[in-house]
Image: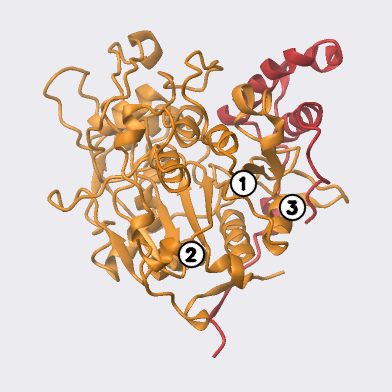
Chain colours: A red, B orange
Amino acid sequence: MAPKVINVPKTDPGAYNPNRPAGTLLRSQGLHMREALIKHVHELTTLLNIEVKSLKTEADVSAYVHKATALLHTHAGKPAKK
Amino acid sequence: MSAGLDNLKHIVVLMMENRSFDHMLGALKQKYPKINGLTGNESNPDTNEAMVRVQPNAQFQSQLDPDPDHHFPGVDLQIFGGAPPGPGRVANMQGFVKDYFSQTKDVNRSHNIMYYFAPDKLPVLTTLATEFAVFNGWFSSIPGPTICNRAFAHYGTSFGQVGMDIFYILDTSIASIYERMIQAGHTAKIYYYDQPSSTMEIVNLLKNQPQIFATFDQFIGDCSGNTLPEYSFIEPCYNDHPGPDGGQILASDQHPDHNVREGERFIGDVYNAIRTNPTLWESTALLVVYDEHGGIYDHVAPPACTPDGYTASADATGTGEPFEFDRLGIRVPAVLISPWIPRGTVVTGTEDPVNAQIFEHASIPGTVTNFFLKGDAKRTVREQQAKTFLGLLTDQMRPDDDCVVFNNLQ
């Protein structure tokens, strides 16, 4: 007998909103990233000049976090696909 | 030792964001009375002193915006109903609506904090909770926000932190669970979703030990390729962002106001990656747990706990009183999954004081250290005394057709 399969409905297509204002957690993540970047200060002058408090949306924070992580984490694989 | 433990080679922890036990699983009590959820009569006063009952009206998105308060002073209000700090006050769980009003400035909207999900809206989490083991008494480690609570999952302590501030670990004698494992010749990884989402473990782990990190794609590959480390910690996607091919990547962490269904699908993905590899399935225990309650109502008062030797100052707590780390945070959903766990296992919590088994996030490094390292690591007293969870694995492995599979519809 085959195992029971439970269907999980698709997420509402309107759920995607990269312009949603970033909350406390994501803003903190940005600040923590900035702190960690100090280790790479010579290479990262441009990134460090970005004022984290000016990052308004999830897309803003995401772009910042992406660049920061790429510099901090050279072991990462290819980006996720969906 | 049980046959389940004899076969165990991998422990995987998926830590989601900011939802309380009652909000996600409380409705299960109606069908499964042993689950310490909601009767439907639980209530909180609003700012007009009208009593607001819990209601099964939770939606996937848009009800909890602004993000409910879950910083230390706000959680103190939620737990103690506004009684000022001091001896003798009672944790009555009566301050949730009033605290949410302080953000919404709208009485009707403040009632949303009492909403919970009907089980059919959460087919993944509620199925896992009823098909495997659900914990009635798993609490966040601190009545506060994300960063300090997640620190307990990695170190068994937050080193005195109760907030979101950047902190450096000065007591280097307490290593993270990943360092402990690797230094002892074992394997461990943190899998974050992708680079635009990244990790929340930045200043002390990502900065100094990038080799312990990998992406969720790599987790999927490690599952299918039988290269999964002995211990894995998975972080969901924390933000909505464009995908590499112009697609849309949705946050899957379930942090308000991110879509809860997307988180359901993510939990299903993690489960399926293990479940569909027979070798991995019989040798892996998967824990799905939430870091903290996110300011959302739960009816169970957090119990006292063993202090871990740190004190947060009155300035740090924001309540006017220091905190000795002698009380846990608010209860969160936690489910342990393995074919060696009987269907319908309910782990007793504070509803049965004689048989209560209380868990918190220090239980995670505590369990991993006890199992893989035989307890051989320097740890806080808090972690040493934290309850471990592998005793739920039995001698009997359930047949393949007795364990569900999820199908994420496209």
How far, Cα to Cα, is label 1 from label 3? 12 Å
In the rendered structure, the residue with mark 1 lies on which chain? B
Q: Look at the picture and state if B50 lies above or below A67.
A: below
Query: Do dots 2 and 3 share one subunit?
Result: yes
Q: Is residue B214 left or right of residue B256?
A: right
Mark 1 or mark 2, whichever is nearer to me: 2
Q: Residue at x 64, y 69 (%)?
A: B277
Please state the horizontal and vertical placement of residue B141, each as a whole percent of the image. 37, 34
Instruction: Check disc 2: other Cα within 10 Å, few if <14, some if 14-19, many if 20+.
Output: some
| Quadrant of the image containing the N terminus of chain B | bottom left
Question: Could you tell me residue B89's position as x and y percent?
Answer: 15, 25
Amino acid type for the residue under numbered disc 2: Asn
The kind of residue on which mark 3 rests is Asp
Q: Among all residues in the image, which is located at the extreme bottom?
A: A1
Please tell me whether mark 2 or mark 3 is closer to you in this view: 2
Q: Residue at x 43, y 20 (%)?
A: B159
The residue labelled by disc 3 is B217
Rendered image quadrant of residue B367: top left
Q: Which residue is mark 1?
A: B236
Per the image, label 2 sits on a secondary structure element best described as helix
Q: Residue at 42% across / 27% down in the picture?
A: B378
